Image (spheres, grey):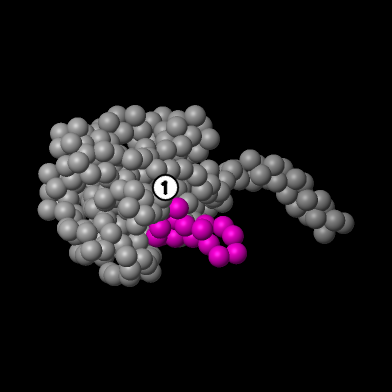
Amino acid sequence: MMTRRLAAIAVAALVCVGPAVAQEKQPPLRTGVDGTFAPHAMPKLGGGTEGFQIDVFTEVAKRMKRDITIDSVSFSTLIPGMQAGRYDFIAAPTTVTKERAENMLFTAGYLWTAFQFGIKKGTPPIKGWEDLKGKTVAVNKGTPYETLSKQMGEKYGFTVQAYDTQPDATQAVLSGRAYATLGGNTTIVYAANKTPQFVADLELKDTRAHWAAPVPKNNPKLRAELQDALDCMKKDGTMAKLYEKWFNKKPEPDDLAVVITPGYGVPDMPGYDPTPHELKCG
């Protein structure tokens, strides 16, 4: 009799706990990448998308005990998509600027980026913006590379062509439609390694900036959870391993792939929270 009574109590307890556990199950994180931005995200043989961003944020979601869905779309649709509620955050490498930080919350940076030109093999190297006078520069639409190129194009007298993807901009150079392309250093160097006729050229040293993950301005909790996972990956060496896997080199000692910055967000940018917090890694 006692055994039956205990069994009944146990069943009743499970019935009571069951719905609560179900309610605690959080929905998958929804995010997106530019699926043609190698080696950060690119089509995978057999279907799907692979790359540094895919590995990083799949691991982030795992540490947050969440599933994740990652859409492959044009970069220019990602920020509007997040602002419209379609995405919880953006997994594509996103350059932190003052204008963007006024409208979104950013995690701390997880990679340094710098602007770099790519040209066709045999083309005279670029020494400065003035060398582009009368020429055409191809860029990825909706990126800071487009913004800067258009500003400099007006100043130095060159034309800017905007393409939906960075590979399209690179192809414009290889086909002769553009003299050069301006993009992120990691993608330009990667394309040069894969394409013998394409050369990584002048890097603009004064453009070094944080690549970080943006979330909507009204969700500091998600920003903190994402950054904690990223920081723990820096702390235990996971980020450095992924860096080496996809970029074929170890991160420098001052690289954001290994450096944990204080507070939440990017120092000296709008939305930065300098409040100290203890990093708890499971």
Please tell me whether residue 48 belongs to the stretch shown in magenta: yes
Residue 251 falls in image quadrant:
bottom left
> Magenta stretch mostly in which secondary structure?
loop
Residue 229, image x and y in percent? 40, 53
255, 277: nearer the viewer = 255
Q: Residue at x 32, y 52 (%)?
A: 176
Amino acid at pointer 1: Thr
Judge the density around disc 1: few (<14), some (14-19), many (≥20) Cα neighbours within 10 Å: many
Disc 1 designates what residue? 165
Residue 134, image x and y in percent? 20, 41
Q: Is residue 240 left or right of residue 53?
A: left
Q: Residue at x 17, y 50 (%)?
A: 204
32, 14: nearer the viewer = 32
Residue 48, image x and y in percent? 56, 57
149, 77: nearer the viewer = 149
Please tell me whether residue 18 belongs to the stretch shown in magenta: no
**Is residue 165 visible to us here?**
yes
Q: Quadrant of the C terminus?
A: bottom left
Q: Residue at x 59, y 43 (%)?
A: 27
Q: Residue at x 35, y 36 (%)?
A: 105
Q: Quadrant of the N terminus?
A: bottom right
Magenta extent: 36-52
Residue 224, image x and y in percent? 38, 43
60, 185: nearer the viewer = 185
Count the labels in the image: 1
As helix, strand or loop, the secondary structure at mark 1 comes to loop
